């Protein structure tokens, strides 16, 4: 017993002596190591298309869980085909690249991806390497309109600004997972009344290689204004909203709402090309169910500070008169502002806000009388760029490219259409609208100031839009400490 006590005392004395007289630095062991730098190549560029439009209700139209694809979507793409690369289209390996740009069109029913396999890992990515989009004219008893969206790079977070679950409105959230890893998604839904606290917004399964479909009315019923935030865990996914309108017994417009990329205090909207303004007015005064046949600005304000906003719709010529709208958008809510007074003509929009916001513009097209219709599309705030970007023009319909120069001085932009090169000088604070050749890619090559651009597509009066994006994966150097 005495020996055990003596051992404890000796150990205690040793520790006290070390703490009192020892060097504190000697108490920490820091093995010396070397730092190495490794270059990590970007993973192969992949963009995913969501596939054909989807009809809820199954074959009978009455099922609460049944969904079916309607026909096929037209996928239009452009690939620069550099050497040492191969384009994989919807799982089928293509031929090696030989340095010649290739434009192509394919039909797609279910989700499909396009992947540039790069043997070197050093090919510069972006829309100059690969760009693709999809459009589809839908005409059924339950759904009618031109739907279109970009094929986008799978990611882990998206904001979708637009849509409604009001009477006669259906918003279907389409989550696609092209990866080989299962994913789960969490949602935040904001409306004119603030944040939704519905059950079932988290842990939504998006299996590998599959599409998950969610009617947003199951979370927010009778919401006239929406913004949806999607965050995925596991595999990277894509997200969009398929929005449609039914008035009475007649389907009256549809489109996809693709992800917004801009949280900003200043946003630009190229391509507000107004047609059928007089017919839209006739419908609006005829019945309440046509009250939304109107150009409209939607704003979602994150955080807890209200935003004072000013929106200008400016004509592209001296003969086209625009309008100005001002107001307050409440924090944490979605606010809509009707853009009134625009007659037929080409416009672009500028939004100024006292705080950063997400925003979108709804553009409508209407015809009354014989072969009457109503259709709409949602323009998301455009991205600024001063390096070359490409967008593919579908073979169907009439497409127009709208380019905005926000600078205080004129700028020159070279437009590459197939093998032809056209030079355009865009005046300060103005826009240029260019008729695009069907079935050919367009290269937008700024020579100075940053510009904004959008492609507007019209098929027999129905309308959709394709943004000018620049999807790319990141490469670079990684520092690793070796012990």
Image (tube, helix red, strand yellow):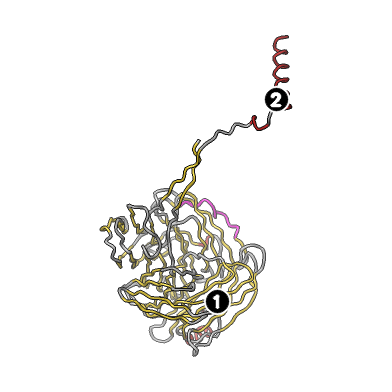
| Residue found 52% across the figure and 55% down from its top | 231
- At label 2, counting other C-alpha atoms closer than 10 Å, the crowd grade (few under 14, some 14-19, many 20 or more) is few
Q: Nearer the viewer, residue 428 or 56?
A: 428
> Which region of the structure is painted magenta?
196-205
Instruction: Indicate whether residue 290 is drawn in magenta.
Output: no
- Image quadrant in which you'd find residue 187: bottom right
Residue at the disc numbered 2: 18
Separation of disc 2 and disc 1 at Cα? 70 Å
- Quadrant containing the N terminus is top right
| Residue found 54% across the figure and 52% down from its top | 202
Please state if 10 lies on the left or on the right of 459 as rendered.
right
Residue 345 position within the rendered picture, expressed as x and y whole percent measured from the top left: 47, 85
State the SS at label 2: helix
Residue 131 position within the rendered picture, expressed as x and y whole percent measured from the top left: 37, 65
Magenta region's main secondary structure? loop
Residue at the disc numbered 1: 350
């Amino acid at each position: 017993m005495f020996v055990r006590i003596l051992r404890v005392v000796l150990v205690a004395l040793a520790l006290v002596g070390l703490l009192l007289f020892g060097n504190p630095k000697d108490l920490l062991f820091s093995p010396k190591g070397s730092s190495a730098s490794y270059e990590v190549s970007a993973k192969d560029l992949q963009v995913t298309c969501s596939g054909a439009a989807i009809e809820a209700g199954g074959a009978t139209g009455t099922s609460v869980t049944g969904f079916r694809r309607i026909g096929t979507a037209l996928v239009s793409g452009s690939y620069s085909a550099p050497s040492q690369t191969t384009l994989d289209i919807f799982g089928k390996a293509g031929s090696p690249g030989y340095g010649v740009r290739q434009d192509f069109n394919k039909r797609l029913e279910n989700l499909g991806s396009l992947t540039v396999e790069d043997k070197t890992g050093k090919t510069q990515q972006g829309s100059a390497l690969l760009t693709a989009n999809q459009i589809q004219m839908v005409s059924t008893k339950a759904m009618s309109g031109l739907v279109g969206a970009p094929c986008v790079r799978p990611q882990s977070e998206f904001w979708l600004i637009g849509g409604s679950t009001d009477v006669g409105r259906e918003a279907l959230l389409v989550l696609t997972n092209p990866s080989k890893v299962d994913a789960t998604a969490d949602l935040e839904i904001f409306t004119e009344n603030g944040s939704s606290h519905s059950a079932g917004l988290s842990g939504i399964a998006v299996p590998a290689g599959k599409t998950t479909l969610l009617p947003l009315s199951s979370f927010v019923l009778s919401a006239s204004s929406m913004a949806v935030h999607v965050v995925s865990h596991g595999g990277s996914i894509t997200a969009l909203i398929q929005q449609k309108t039914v008035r009475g017994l007649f389907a009256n417009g549809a489109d996809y709402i693709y992800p917004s990329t801009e949280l900003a205090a200043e946003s630009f909207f190229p391509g507000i090309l107004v047609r059928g303004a007089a017919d839209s007015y006739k419908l609006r005064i005829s019945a309440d169910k046509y009250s939304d046949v109107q150009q409209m600005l939607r704003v979602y304000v994150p955080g807890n500070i209200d935003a004072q906003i000013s929106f200008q719709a400016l004509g592209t010529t001296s003969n086209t008169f625009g309008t100005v709208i001002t107001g307050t958008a409440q924090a944490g809510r979605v606010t809509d502002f009707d853009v009134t007074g625009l007659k037929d003509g080409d416009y672009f929009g500028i939004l100024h806000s006292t705080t950063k916001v997400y925003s979108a513009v709804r553009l409508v097209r209407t015809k009354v009388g014989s072969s009457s219709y109503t259709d709409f599309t949602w323009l998301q705030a455009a991205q600024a760029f001063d390096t070359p970007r490409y967008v593919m023009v579908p073979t169907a319909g009439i497409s127009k490219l709208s380019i905005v120069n926000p600078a205080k001085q004129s700028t020159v932009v070279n437009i590459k259409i197939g093998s032809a090169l056209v030079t355009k000088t865009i005046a300060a604070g103005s826009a240029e609208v260019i008729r695009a050749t069907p079935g050919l890619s367009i290269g937008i090559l700024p020579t100075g100031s940053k510009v904004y651009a959008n492609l507007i597509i019209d098929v027999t009066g129905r309308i959709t839009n394709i943004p000018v994006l620049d999807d790319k994966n990141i490469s670079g150097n990684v520092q690793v400490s070796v012990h």
